[in-house]
Amino acid sequence: MYAILDIETTGGKYNEEGITEIAIYRFDGHEVVDQFSSLINPERSIQPFVVNLTGINNQMLRNAPKFYEVAKRIIEITDDCILVAHNAKFDNRILTTEFDRLGYKYEKNTLCTVELSKRLIPGLPSYSLGKLVKSLGIPLTDRHRAQGDARATVSLFKMLLNKDTSKNIIQAAVRKNPKRQLEPKLLDLIAEAPSETGVYYMHREDGKIIYIGKSKNIKKRLVQHFTSDNRKSKRMQVEVTSVSFEKTGSDLIAQLKESEEIKRNKPVYNRALRKSIFNHQLTSFIDDYGYINLKIEKADGRKKAITTFTNHQQAKAILFKITEEYALCQKLNGLHKTQGSCFQYSIKECNGACIHQETPEEYNQRVRAFITQKSFTNQHMLIVDKGRDVEERSVVLIEDGRYMGFGFFSLNHQITNPNILKTLINPMQHNRDVQHIIQNYLRKNKKLKIVNLAKDAIN
């Protein structure tokens, strides 16, 4: 659990500043579950430059509550939380100083979104909150007011959690949270999980991830893990002390995140999933008569594949559909073994390439059209899908046939502005597994929004 906050102060000498406004959002890693904001009477004058910066003046604070009047609420909303702020060292020092004046020992672990942004989004010209969120397409209203800055920090932190594919943030949170280190009942872990699409992470007591999975219903999948009596499940049930999760909305992004993060984190119970997730591929060759033949064969990284398949049965079913859609020949595609014409020719759905009645030039034109359209090599596009809530959408970026990464957006200008799009996308590794995941997903989901890009669209 995180308490994302922003504090405005009077300015003045070090450790003599007073709080003029505070906003705190209690964030469970996915959504805000509680919030508190208030002007505060600092019982001292505000420096003129601060008045000009924030718009908060002494007159506005005359009837505001004093810090001791809101202290209990601050303690409650930050209970069991890691404090998150943009320049967290400053906000934590100010808050600790105020509690010291009341004789109360207030100690919290902190995370700084300035430091996290520099590590997870390197190379930006500025990491000040205003310029940073603008470059990321995050709305910011009421700049230099606690509530506006804190809301923007929530959106920024949500993005940083998503970019943290090594899961350093969440693993540190599990280690630092003593309540999470107690071995909870498996029923409690299930109760806390959402019935939504996303990726989940099983942790042992020291925060280490021992298993990564994805599901369209995380709660239901955990029930299966924790009620199974197979050997691996039983061992996981003994070791797991907490489960964290990330909603994705899109099943495609859940699959891509699972694949990437298993390779990065190498959880001990994901050994089987580290292997390739497909075992057949579609290739092409030119026969002795000049016709391009399509061929299903076992996956081989040394050969260039048009597309890949989970198994031979899937490959054969899809090749039948391709043959029908592009009016190709079942004999040339290895689907009908015969010395003469294929079955499709007898029902006038093949133009006779099987008996050389159609010229190679005419036939190959349709085969090349299929390869150009379906091959990953030439794709340059955005795949737009569901987001984590009704106002959000997800996006997957493909450039020159390479998977570049994914992101989330809520405003259309964020994906039409090349500079913002670059920062929204979490860079990911391209490999044959993710290529298979994307191609397989596109085959099954015909209603996805595809935005074709010019080759230099975001360069």
Image (spheres, rainbow, N blue to C red):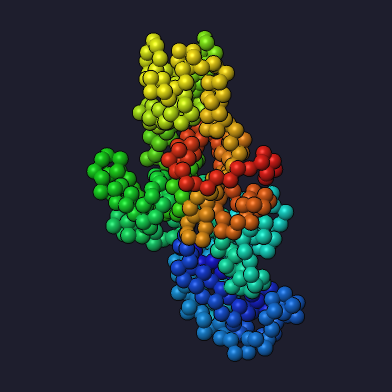
271 vs 383, left or right, is left
What residue sits 58% from the left and 36% below the top?
379
Nearer to me, 447 or 57: 447
Which residue does the image show at 56% across and 73% down from the upper left?
23
Q: Give the left or right position of residue 228, taking residue 370 as reference.
A: left
Q: Up-down: is 277 above or below 364? A: below
The quarter of the displayed image where residue 270 is located: top left
Is residue 147 in sight in this rendering? Answer: yes
Name which residue lies at 33% across and 49% down.
221
Picture layout, residue 34 above or below residue 171: below
Quadrant of residue 324 within the rendered picture: top left
As drawn, 235 above or below 53: above
Residue 295 appears in the figure:
no
Q: How many marks?
A: 0
Instruction: Give the percent coordinates (x, y) of residue 278.
Output: 42, 31
- From the viewer's perspective, tell me whether residue 359 is left or right of residue 417: left
Q: Is 4 or 239 nearer to us in this picture?
A: 4
Rendered residue at 56%/79% (across/down): 38
- The one of 50 and 17 positioned closer to us in this rendering: 50
Residue 235 percent across, percent down from the top left = 30, 43
- Whole-percent x, y for residue 263 in the image: 48, 38
- In the rendered image, the quadrant that contains the C terminus is top right
The spot of residue 345 in percent (x, y) is 41, 20
